[in-house]
Image (cartoon, rainbow, N blue to C red):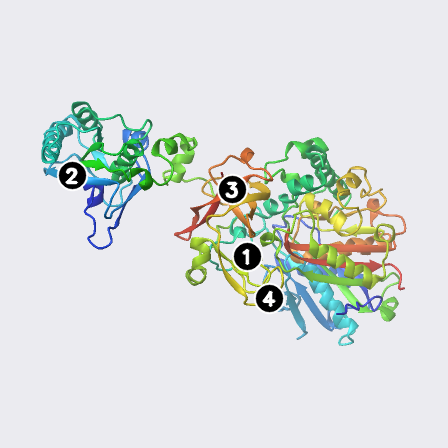
């Protein structure tokens, strides 16, 4: 058993990210062109023709590498389309990074896109293949699945129900406040805690509409080269410290030993990522984290699984402002899924884009002071049955 | 009404070899605002036949006539009825003749219990008065093909050994029978008494009722319908889907629903035995109320259920309001329709509070 990682072997030297939102005017192809053109415009030495291979992440906006090669008019290049639930964009990035680290290619691009708003549905519309009609996921919605965390967490740790609700409200308030400062976000206004609390319970369990990430369209991309050559392309590359991916056995929904207060997949993934990056005290060493805040209770539980909060304490840390933009560990400084919505293939790369901006000092009103290590995290699936991805990136090559 | 011989001529004749089982069930749908809608009932009853019965059939007679009282075109949602006074005029002589013949064949002038079942409300009421019928269970409407069965079951819930019952069923004619209750009656009763079941149940709004009857089409959720259940996977999962049979690991005892080949507890492969769980009770581990989900009975309550003795599954909670479900709530399984998709009714198990 080994997970050696590729610490400081590859670096990002250019990125692009569209505005996320209900992009009625743009197709998936348009979004792909927008994101990649923005990226190439920032890297004068690398044009489309200089990229040796592409990895494309999309859950449902098309199949095969043609989804990218056709709109970009690529010159007979290798394009690999990948899918791994909500970690799809991150998975494209992980595999693209390995392609460079292996020496197979010099310059590789990871691209993620999702066009959700053409479906006519208000939530994420994913089909589950033909089955025997006994799978609860045939009817249970995603907010309902994640709302299962709330009563279980309160029950296990004896957390007052109102305090838990306040912590969920705080997550939504914080991420909306951060998104209000981000010109690329889907939702760009602050939402008061009173308004968030007043909407609670109308979607699933105690979740209201403000406890749920939005549904949006978007695309983002990254150019990856070998770390030792990174400074040839930009004076401020972003170095990959860790890439971890875990697919759990999905036994939580059928095994009474699972208590719906943790994502075992994330805890294991974090352990692996910290080992790869040689991070021993994550709360102190990580400067910022972009995590998968699909629903507000998810972010609370993630803080514990990622080692940022002690078990049973995330609700308190959140309420005390530890993860605010000006807190000890800013979480979702760009506004998170809460403000960006969740175009599946694009989200993981959008998270990396915030690290990219922060390391370069280009995050505007959200700019953090001298960030060193950033984390991006995706969760795909549901409590007890999910995949997890974590990257750790740094501003300096170790 | 009444194509089925069971519905009009109970008691049925026992099969000489096996005894047999008579099952009668019906859902009565009337046009909105009709008296059929108001007075209709849904229900089912079953009687097993055999030697040494709890009830002996002493006599049985039938009268019939051709007249237009009730009719329904195949496919129509509800029946129509001719003017009530005409039906009363035709039914009463048929009822009187059948009842007196059954009594005289039995050598009795009267019985300890008398029950009358008829889709014709006034004929039923008039016959009950003339024959001195025992009042039927409070709140039981007319349950169509199941009506006589339900009324007989309610009577047998109370009847004592040696007592006699006159059963009268008037539908396009009249069947009458005299029964005698034997001393095996106490052992033959199964399930909760009819009266107790009538006291259970819960109120639903008229709009919900109309929706369930298919008489009101509501705005669907803005998400795709669930996939219709597929034939081959449902056939492969027959024991699981229809009988809630899981698997138990022979090595470590871990119970799995649905059944699996690889043990979640110890990793053993293909070391499983059958684990039927349909009769198991369970406890809520966590729960939610899904206000967006596709369900005939929104909002859908979902509970993660840990079964006594092992096994966990997420199931829809039925016959309960959201505030009746919490961590620790005790539940039992009940076989229900989850939804209809692509024209296929999807039957599986739900849970309800005990």
Of the two numbered discs 4 and 3 on the same chain, state the one appearing first in sequence: 4
* Residue B76 drawn above or below residue A292: above
Q: Dot 1 corresponds to which residue?
A: B256
SS at circle 2:
strand
Q: Dot 4 corresponds to which residue?
A: B268
List x then y, in percent, for residue B137. 31, 28
SS at circle 3:
strand
Q: Which corner quadrant of the image does residue B90 belong to?
A: top left
Q: Dot 3 corresponds to which residue?
A: B331
Callouts 1 and 2 close, C-beta under 8 Å: no
Mark in the foreground, 3 or 2: 2
Of the two numbered discs 1 and 4 on the same chain, state the one appearing first in sequence: 1
- Going by the image, does B81 lie left or right of A132? left
What chain does mark 4 sit on? Answer: B
Judge by depth and name the residue closer to the eye, B200 or B214: B200
- Going by the image, does A137 lie left or right of B87? right
What chain does mark 3 sit on? Answer: B
Of the two numbered discs 1 and 3 on the same chain, state the one appearing first in sequence: 1
Q: Which corner quadrant of the image does residue B58 belong to?
A: top left
* Residue name at image x 75 percent, y 70 percent: A1
**How would you rate the neighbour count of disc 3 (Cα within 10 Å): few for under 14, some for 14-19, many for 20 or more?**
many
User: Real-space Cα distance between discs 2 and 4?
Assistant: 61 Å
Check chain identity for marks 4 and 3: say if they share one.
yes
Q: Dot 2 corresponds to which residue?
A: B58
Of the two numbered discs 1 and 2 on the same chain, state the one appearing first in sequence: 2
**How would you rate the neighbour count of disc 4 (Cα within 10 Å): few for under 14, some for 14-19, many for 20 or more?**
some
User: Real-space Cα distance between discs 3 and 2?
Assistant: 44 Å
Check chain identity for marks 2 and 4: say if they share one.
yes
Of the two numbered discs 3 and 2 on the same chain, state the one appearing first in sequence: 2
SS at circle 1:
strand
């Amino acid at each position: 058993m080994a997970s050696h990682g590729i610490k400081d072997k590859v670096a990002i030297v250019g990125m692009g990210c569209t505005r996320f939102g209900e992009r009625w005017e743009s197709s998936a192809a348009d979004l792909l062109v927008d994101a990649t053109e923005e990226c190439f415009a920032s890297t004068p030495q690398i044009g489309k023709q200089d990229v040796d291979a592409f990895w494309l992440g999309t859950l449902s906006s098309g199949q095969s590498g043609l989804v990218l090669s056709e709109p970009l008019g690529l010159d007979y290049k290798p394009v690999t389309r990948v899918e791994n639930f909500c970690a799809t964009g991150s998975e494209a990035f992980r595999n693209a990074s390995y392609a460079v680290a292996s020496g197979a290619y010099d310059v590789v691009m990871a691209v993620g896109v999702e066009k959700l708003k053409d479906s006519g549905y208000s939530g994420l519309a994913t089909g589950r293949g033909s089955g025997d009609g006994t799978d609860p996921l045939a009817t249970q919605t995603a907010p309902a699945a994640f709302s299962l965390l709330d009563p279980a967490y309160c029950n296990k740790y004896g957390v007052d129900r109102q305090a838990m609700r306040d912590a969920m409200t705080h997550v939504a308030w914080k991420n909306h406040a951060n998104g209000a400062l981000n010109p690329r976000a889907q939702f760009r206004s602050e939402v008061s805690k009173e308004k968030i609390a007043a909407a609670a319970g109308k979607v699933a369990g105690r979740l209201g509409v403000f406890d749920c990430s939005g549904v949006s369209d978007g695309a983002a991309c990254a150019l990856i080269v070998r770390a030792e050559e990174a400074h040839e392309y930009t004076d401020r590359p972003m170095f990959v410290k860790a890439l971890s991916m875990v697919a759990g056995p999905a036994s939580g929904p059928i095994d009474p030993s699972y208590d719906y207060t943790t994502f075992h997949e994330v805890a294991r993934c974090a352990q692996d990522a910290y080992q790869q990056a040689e991070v021993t005290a994550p709360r102190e060493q990580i400067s910022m984290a972009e995590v998968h805040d699909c629903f507000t209770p998810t972010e609370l539980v993630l803080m514990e699984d990622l080692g940022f909060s002690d078990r049973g304490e995330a609700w308190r840390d959140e309420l005390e402002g530890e993860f605010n933009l000006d807190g000890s560990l800013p979480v979702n400084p760009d506004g998170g899924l809460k403000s960006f919505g969740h175009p599946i293939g694009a989200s993981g790369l959008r998270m990396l884009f915030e690290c990219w901006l922060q390391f370069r000092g280009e995050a505007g009103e959200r700019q953090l002071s001298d960030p060193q290590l950033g984390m991006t995290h995706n969760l795909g699936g549901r409590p007890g049955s999910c995949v997890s991805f974590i990257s750790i990136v740094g501003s300096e090559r170790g | 009404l009444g194509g089925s011989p069971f519905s009009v001529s109970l008691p049925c004749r026992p099969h000489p070899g096996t005894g047999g089982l008579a099952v009668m069930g019906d859902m009565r749908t009337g046009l909105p605002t009709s008296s059929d809608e108001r007075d209709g009932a849904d229900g089912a009853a079953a009687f097993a036949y055999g030697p040494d019965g709890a009830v002996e059939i002493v006599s049985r007679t039938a009268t019939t006539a051709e007249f237009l009282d009730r009719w329904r075109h195949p496919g129509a949602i509800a029946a129509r009825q001719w003017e009530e006074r005409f039906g009363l005029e035709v039914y009463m002589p048929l009822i009187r003749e059948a009842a007196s013949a059954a009594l005289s064949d039995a050598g009795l002038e009267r019985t300890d219990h008398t029950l009358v079942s008829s889709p014709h409300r006034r004929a039923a009421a008039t016959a009950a008065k003339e024959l001195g019928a025992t009042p039927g269970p409070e709140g039981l409407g007319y349950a169509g093909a199941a009506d006589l069965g339900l009324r007989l079951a309610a009577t047998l819930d109370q009847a004592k050994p040696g007592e006699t019952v006159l059963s009268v069923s008037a539908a396009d004619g009249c069947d009458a029978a005299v029964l005698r209750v034997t001393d095996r009656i106490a052992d033959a009763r199964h399930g909760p008494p009819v009266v107790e079941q009538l006291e259970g149940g819960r109120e639903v709004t008229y709009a919900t009722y109309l929706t369930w009857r298919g008489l009101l089409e509501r705005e669907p959720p803005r998400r795709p319908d669930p996939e219709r259940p597929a034939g081959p996977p449902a056939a492969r999962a027959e024991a699981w889907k229809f009988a809630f049979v899981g698997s138990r690991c022979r090595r470590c005892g871990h119970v799995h629903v649905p059944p699996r080949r690889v043990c979640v507890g110890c990793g053993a492969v293909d070391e499983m035995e059958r684990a039927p769980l349909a009769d198991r009770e369970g406890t809520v581990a966590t729960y939610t109320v899904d206000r967006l989900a596709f369900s005939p009975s929104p909002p859908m309550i979902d509970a993660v259920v840990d079964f006594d003795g092992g096994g966990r599954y997420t199931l829809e909670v039925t016959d309960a309001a959201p505030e009746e479900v919490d961590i620790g709530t005790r539940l039992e399984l009940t076989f229900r329709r989850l939804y209809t998709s692509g024209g296929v009714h999807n039957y599986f198990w739900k849970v309800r509070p005990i």
